[in-house]
Image (spheres, grey):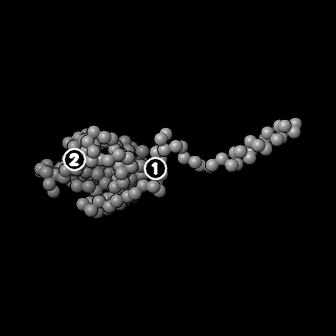
Amino acid sequence: MKNVILLSVCVVAAAASAPIDADPPADVMRIVRAEDVRWQSDPASPGLEVAVIEGDPKVAGKPYVVRVRFAPGTFSAPHFHPETRYVVVLKGTWWVGAGSKWDRDATTPLPTGSFVVHHAGHVHYDGAKGDEVIVQITGIGPTGLTHVNETGQRGR
């Protein structure tokens, strides 16, 4: 009985000295916690912030993951991207529309958890109405954004 008690004490002591909440080794996985995300304002789009989570969206042939945060009432102008992008709504209701004529009332609501594929070269616009929205976008670089005017021509 003494040996069982001694063994139990040793196990408890060893568990108490082990690090709590230690991250796995970096060569096994890289962890990005919400508080580690570094948001940067987009000077061309007031109300938008972007954070690169993984990779570099400018590098050809390499995957990237970015997050975009829309302040309430912020929408992008009609635009397209050169690459297909895969989008998950992480927070809020994201409103999306298609075509070169920007019409906030002709958008579709996509609540948290929704998934969207933005096909390369197709004009769309998106944003937030009443609440903050965060989306996570994955693609293969290089990424880009080309604005179009109401006639579908490049430029605003």
Report crowding for label 2: few under 14, some 14 to 19, many 20 or more residues within 10 A (C-alpha): many
Residue 150 pos. (x, y %) = 14, 53
Quarter the C terminus occupies: bottom left
Relative side of 144 to 73, left or right: left
Residue 108 visible somewhere in the drawing: no
| Residue at x 35%, y 46% (from the top left corner) | 55
Q: Nearer the viewer, residue 96 or 153?
A: 153
Horizontally, is 114 left or right of 7 in the view? left
**Residue type indicated by callout 2:** Phe
Residue beneath label 1, please? 32
Give the residue drawn at x 46%, y 49%.
32
Whether the residues at callouts 2 and 1 have beta carbons within 8 Å, the answer is no
Residue to which mark 2 is pinned: 80
Residue 24, by quadrant, is top right
Query: For this rendering, which residue is in front, 16 or 126?
Result: 16
Looking at the rendered image, the quarter that the N terminus falls into is top right
* Residue occupying image coordinates x 45% and y 55%: 36
Tag 1's secondary structure? loop
